[in-house]
Amino acid sequence: MASHIINNGLKASNEIFEGQVQLYKHMFAFLDSLCLKWCVDQSIPNIIHNHGQPMTLHELVSKLQVPLAKVSGVHRLMRYLAHIGFFDIVRISQEDEEEKEAYALTCVSKLLVRGSDHCLAPMVDHVLDPTILSSYQQLGKWVHDEGNQTPFAMALGTDIWDFLNENPTHMKYFNDATASDSQIINLALRDHGVVFEGLESIVDVAGGTGMVAKYISETFPHLKCIVFDLPQVVKNLKGTNNLSYVGGDMFQSIPKADVVLLKWILHDWDDDNCIKILKKCKDAVSSSNNKRGKIIIIDIVIDDEKKDQPEITQAKLQLDLVVTAYYNGKERTKEEWKKLFMETDCQDYKISPLTGHMSLIEIYI
């Protein structure tokens, strides 16, 4: 009896200790983001990349020009970033010296090298900007609010679109962030060229600066590509022979084309607004030379967690909270997408994987 009580007590204690570790891990998870921001702000991925080989602590702090008293701080920051996968710590030899530890880029930090293909550093600049982050401090207030105000608006007194229009620096961060993400989408579309076969025209709705449309226009020169966004977004942008920019409002009308592209658009909106957008897309496609066109959606589909890797599911659920805080939007499950399509009388559709966490949805009109 005594041993049974002791064993139960040990089990209960171990559960408390394990719970404490998990709690502390999540409580301090903000350090993942802030150390990432420090790394990008200091251009450390570029410094190591330009060095041409793994870089020792001495070489790194010399390049950063940090005071001697802060060398230990840089070491601890880099140790943590290596622990969470942003850098590898390797052993190197230099001119008959003893082996030393050095920092090497990983597949993650290679995506932070500015000036390289597929650089996502602008996304870090936007998402981890202190002003933008203030939105999440309002989640407690937001869940008790009976109105439709977003956490972003609660924090900054205006919705995100008005805020961006009134703050050119943040608008640039936002546009650069979406353009950087589009580079990854372009890489994925390279293996999905079949979706554009037989088409003569495409309109990229809310396409921003046109990064995806530029790729499509260059890869498929027979396609007439239109980037459609608000007038203030596209007014100074220049097109090419098969790429043009048109200003307007997607809730009013969309330029006619064989296919309408919606990349990371519908997750910004609630169901009612998504239905309005999809109906305008149908109008644009349905009347295009009497041909059967389609709507292409690039967005997140939340699957059964058992089918996704845990990290992919976490990324999807995190982005769901991001669009909630910014726009009162949401990421949708397969059933929620199906419901949207049924209410728009779009019953012929196909969902395919595109990138790690993004899907390609084709709606046939």
Image: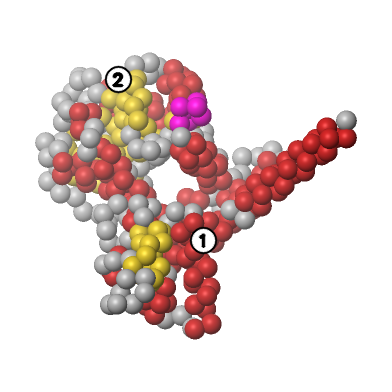
Provide residue 184's location: percent of width, then percent of height: 31, 45
Q: Residue furthest bottom?
A: 68
Residue at position x 51%, y 61% in the image: 80
Residue 319 place in picture, x, y as percent: 49, 42
Q: Amino acid at mark 2?
A: Ile
Would residue 142 be visible to someone looking at this image? Answer: yes
Region of the chain picked out in magenta, as a range: 302-308
Is label 2 in a helix, a strand or a loop?
A: loop
Expressed as whole percent of the image width and height from the top left, the position of residue 203 reads 26, 36
User: According to the image, label 1 marks what residue?
Assistant: 80
Residue drawn at the location 84% of the way across and 35% of the way down: 3
Which mark is on residue 365? 2
Q: CA distance from mark 1 to mark 2?
A: 51 Å
Q: Main secondary structure of the magenta part?
A: loop
Residue lying at 29% horizontally and 77% vertically, measured from the top left = 96
Which quadrant of the rendered structure holds the N terminus?
A: top right
Q: Which mark is residue 312?
A: none
Q: Residue at x 35, y 30 (%)?
A: 353
Q: What amino acid is labelled 1 in the image?
A: Tyr
Residue 332 locus on image (x, y percent): 49, 30
Going by the image, does 281 lie left or right of 128?
Answer: left
Q: Is residue 294 left or right of residue 148?
A: left
Which SS class for mark 1? helix
Location of residue 323 with respect to 306 vertically, above or below: below
Q: Foreground mark, 1 or 2? A: 1
Q: Quadrant of residue 244?
A: top left
Indicate whether 204 appears above or below 82: above
